[in-house]
Image (cartoon, rainbow, N blue to C red):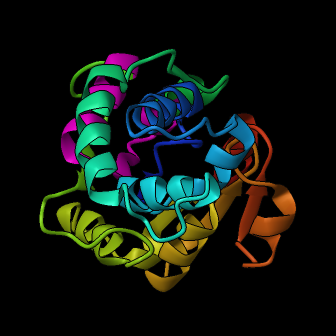
Amino acid sequence: MYQCCIFDLDGTIIDTIESITHSVNLTMKQVGMGAVDQDHVKVFVGDGFKKLVERSLIYLGDEKLLHYDEALDIYEKVFEENCLYKIKPYDGILDLLLFLKERGIKIAVLTNKSHERGMECVESCFGTGFFDLITGEGNGIACKPDPAGAFYTADYFHVSPSRCLYLGDTNTDMKTGIAAGMDTVAVTWGFRKKEELMKFNPKYMADHPEKIKEIFA
């Protein structure tokens, strides 16, 4: 039986696409570029904000990344001000999390967002101390898909990786969970398509948080 569930943040527990798209486009505007549509932002996220900015610039025609350094500095400031913009938990997530907590299963968040912004997003939606552990980028742990953060979470709870369930919505998450030796759940209500996630042969697929309860039945 699983003793710990590790959740990705963006596209898994919280719908943050509005805040990310808004921040990207405010940044691009300040460096004299156009706008990135939401569908492309969904594809560009998952590997941290530096990759997000890089992919956005290339998409808008800055293939030599002439605006990269400037855009990084702007994005960090813009996102600090807008990270809570129109964010909301996905339907059914709170019920799932309460279901897990009632059964004594540890719940954690592992995100490539900066640790500060990750904490801010999670606590604004679920309250302070609701999750047993929140780990974001910038604390000396390599970004996903490096499994270091997943191992850190398992060690924190003194739980074997084989007793951890890893849940995420992108190819980065699939790589992370599999590399950590954890059973992995591909959630299809987030930013990526089911077909993309199926290529990684996750242990489970779920199109709604309610489906995850069945794993513990």
Q: Nearer the viewer, residue 134 or 47?
A: 47
**Residue shown at the point (27%, 21%) measured from the top left:** 81
Count of marks placed on residues: 0
Residue 114 lies in the magenta stretch: yes
User: In the rendered view, does 166 fall on the left or right side of 154?
Assistant: right
Q: Residue furthest left?
A: 140
Q: Residue 192 at what x, y percent from top left? A: 73, 53
Q: Residue 93 at what x, y percent from top left? A: 58, 29
User: In the rendered view, does 37 fall on the left or right side of 112?
Assistant: right
Against 94, residue 2 (above or below) is below
Against 129, residue 166 (above or below) is below
Residue 140 lies in the magenta stretch: no
**Residue shown at the point (61%, 58%) measured from the top left:** 61
**Residue shown at the point (51%, 26%) measured from the top left:** 22
Q: Nearer the viewer, residue 36 or 129?
A: 36
Q: Is residue 45 visible?
A: no
Q: Which residues are magenta?
A: 99-125
Q: Residue 185 at what x, y percent from top left? A: 65, 61
Q: Residue furthest right?
A: 195
Q: Nearer the viewer, residue 172 or 58?
A: 58
Q: Residue 26 at what x, y percent from top left? A: 44, 28
User: In the rendered view, does 83 fall on the left or right side of 100?
Assistant: left
Against 122, residue 118 (above or below) is below
**Residue shown at the point (19%, 38%) measured from the top left:** 116
Q: Is residue 185 visible?
A: yes
